Image (cartoon, rainbow, N blue to C red):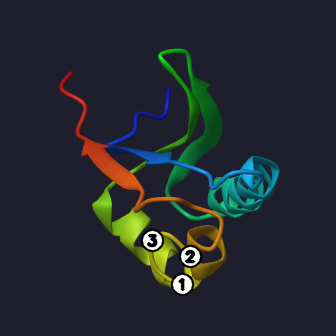
């Protein structure tokens, strides 16, 4: 049986000038931890064709409880280390699959 996420989280980050590589490294570290968290079906860091400066993270979770259990271990959303390399507050959206 395939695993279907009950919650998908998408966060868009705007790296400060010259800090994109640092942001990508921080996202990769968080992605690795998320991938092993209970209830996480996977996490990815992406770019957006329509917005090449943005860094986008996508994670798929069994349910909201699984995501909320992971977030305190990460120091909130986003972690302070990530905030240090950003120009703006990240934009997070959560989606609930239908079907």
Question: How many other residues sit within 10 Å of disc 2, few (<14), some (14-19) or many (≥20)?
Answer: some
Disc on res. 75: 1
Question: How many other residues sit within 10 Å of disc 1, few (<14), some (14-19) or many (≥20)?
Answer: few
Q: Above or below — where is 2 with respect to 67?
A: above
User: Nearest the camera: 81 or 75?
Assistant: 81
SS at badge 3: loop
SS at badge 1: loop
Rendering coords of residue 94 (x, y %)? 28, 47
Rendering coords of residue 58 (x, y %)? 51, 40
Quarter of image, res 97: top left
Q: Residue at x 68, y 53 (%)?
A: 31
SS at badge 2: loop
Residue of label 3: 77
Residue of label 2: 79
Question: How many other residues sit within 10 Å of disc 3, few (<14), some (14-19) or many (≥20)?
Answer: few
Q: Above or below — where is 67 with respect to 8?
A: below
In this figure, what is the number of numbered marks?
A: 3
Rendering coords of residue 65 (x, y %)? 32, 68
User: Nearest the camera: 60 or 77?
Assistant: 77
Q: Residue at x 56, y 76 (%)?
A: 79
Pointers 2 and 3 in contact (C-beta within 8 Å): yes
Q: Above or below — where is 48 with respect to 20?
A: above
Pointers 1 and 2 in contact (C-beta within 8 Å): yes
């Amino acid at each position: 049986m395939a695993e279907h996420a009950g919650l998908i989280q998408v966060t868009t980050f705007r790296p400060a000038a010259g800090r994109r590589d640092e942001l990508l490294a921080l996202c990769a570290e968080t992605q690795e931890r998320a991938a092993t968290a209970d209830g996480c079906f996977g996490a990815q860091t992406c770019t957006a064709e329509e917005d090449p400066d943005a860094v986008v993270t996508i994670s798929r979770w069994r349910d909201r409880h699984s995501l909320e259990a992971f977030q305190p271990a990460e120091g909130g959303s986003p972690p302070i280390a990530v905030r240090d390399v950003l120009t703006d507050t990240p934009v997070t959206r959560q989606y609930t699959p239908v079907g």
